[in-house]
Image (tube, rainbow, N blue to C red):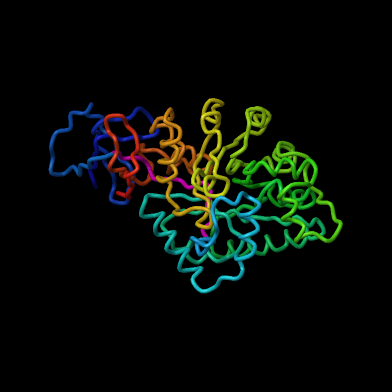
Amino acid sequence: MRFISAQYVITCSGPVLKRPVICTEDDGTIISIKDTGGDLRESELTEFYNGIIIPGFVNCHCHLELSYLHNKISPSTGLHGFLRELDRIRYNIAGEEEKMALNADKAMFDEGVVLCADICNSSLTFPLKKESPIRYTNLIEVFGIDHNKAQQRIEEALLLADMAEKYGLKWNLTPHSVYSVPVPLFRLIKKYSLSNTLTSIHFLESEGEISFLESHSGPLMDVYRNFLPAGMTPLTVKDPISAVLDEVTASGCLILVHNTFIRRQHIQALRKRENLYYCICPNSNLFIEGKLPPVELLAEENCNVVIGTDSLSSNYELSILSELKTLSMNFPSLSLETITKWATLNGALALSESKWAGSIEPGKKPGLVLIENVDLHNMRLLPESRARRLL
């Protein structure tokens, strides 16, 4: 049994508490939270920390298998430039893929990630996930702009799903994006994902997506000419909204990833979709497009926002705290309590794991993370703020 306290505790299940005492089992299960009203009496049994304690982080969008591409891709080239460079080098580097993924998994755990929705295009990370203390939900991602190869793509994805099953890993089939999945492939993915608990799709991460869908023109079309037979017109959806509402399974929760160029009319049109979550990956958006999503608009529209890191091919670290610092710096109207909820409870709800994760409540085992070097007077993150796992 442990007794743990800090200057403040953001429970994500009630008000922010000042110097409460959290009592836990040795395995991390919360027994009780005693509200001292800030009047904490000194006790040799209580571990006291000078900072803020929050529940364990939930990373709602990651590509762990791309960790070997750390510092290999140029920033600020736009989505089309990123995709072109990723395709050029992705399959031409060998040697330390497993080691880099293992290091990234450990770094996430040390900083306090307890739960992660991870995109899988290969079985590279399956062995380490079987042993990892982080609980992973594996999203077997399907894409391929050539509609003639739709059956081949779905068969490849189902083989990968079988491998995940053999490792005892939780998985769901998911489409990559509205711009990389033609309608015939969308329909096949939907057929095999009717019982999904979770689906995700990269959504409005570049301005070029809309022009590509409307007229098959622009920089994305320039990239795809290398993947299409001469003269073929892609059989794409007509727009991003119809893709989500008509072509993606209605089962379970749906995470829209990035939302860098989302607008109010998009958000309002998407209200027809239940169990919808908007994942933002601020540092990846800055790396690729040099632009942040309209975060204040998402908050104003009461969207269910969650946080992701994307991959080390488009980010310098898989740090949820780093994402929160970027949000705090660029959107000062957002409270620390709000962005903490996005990175914890909302993520646990999106991944259907809120029975044990996401908030500090009796009976749960959410992990405890200490954030140090914080502006405690204003409850603001600082550039030097850092996170470390307590439980």
Is 211 left or right of 27, judged from the image as shown? right
Residue projecting furthest to the bottom: 95
- Does the magenta portion include 63? yes
In the rendered image, which quarter is residue 225 located in?
Answer: bottom right
Above or below, comparing residue 121 to residue 259 in the picture: below
Instruction: Determine the residue positioned at 67% across, 50% down.
Output: 175
Instruction: Determine the residue positioned at 64% across, 62% down.
Output: 87
Across and down, in percent, residue 9 comes to: 30, 35
Across and down, in percent, residue 205 comes to: 62, 43
Residue projecting furthest to the right: 231
Magenta part of the chain:
52-64
Is 15 left or right of 127, judged from the image as shown? left
- Does the magenta portion include 152? no
Instruction: Determine the residue positioned at 78% across, 40% down.
Output: 214
Is 357 left or right of 280, judged from the image as shown? left
Decide which of 89, 44 is in the foreground and name it. 89
Main SS class of the magenta portion in the image: strand
Above or below, comparing residue 342 to residue 146 in the picture: above
Across and down, in percent, residue 88 comes to: 64, 64
Above or below, comparing residue 187 to residue 268 in the picture: below
Number of marks drawn: 0
Above or below, comparing residue 170 to residue 349 in the picture: below
Decide which of 255, 207 is in the foreground and name it. 207
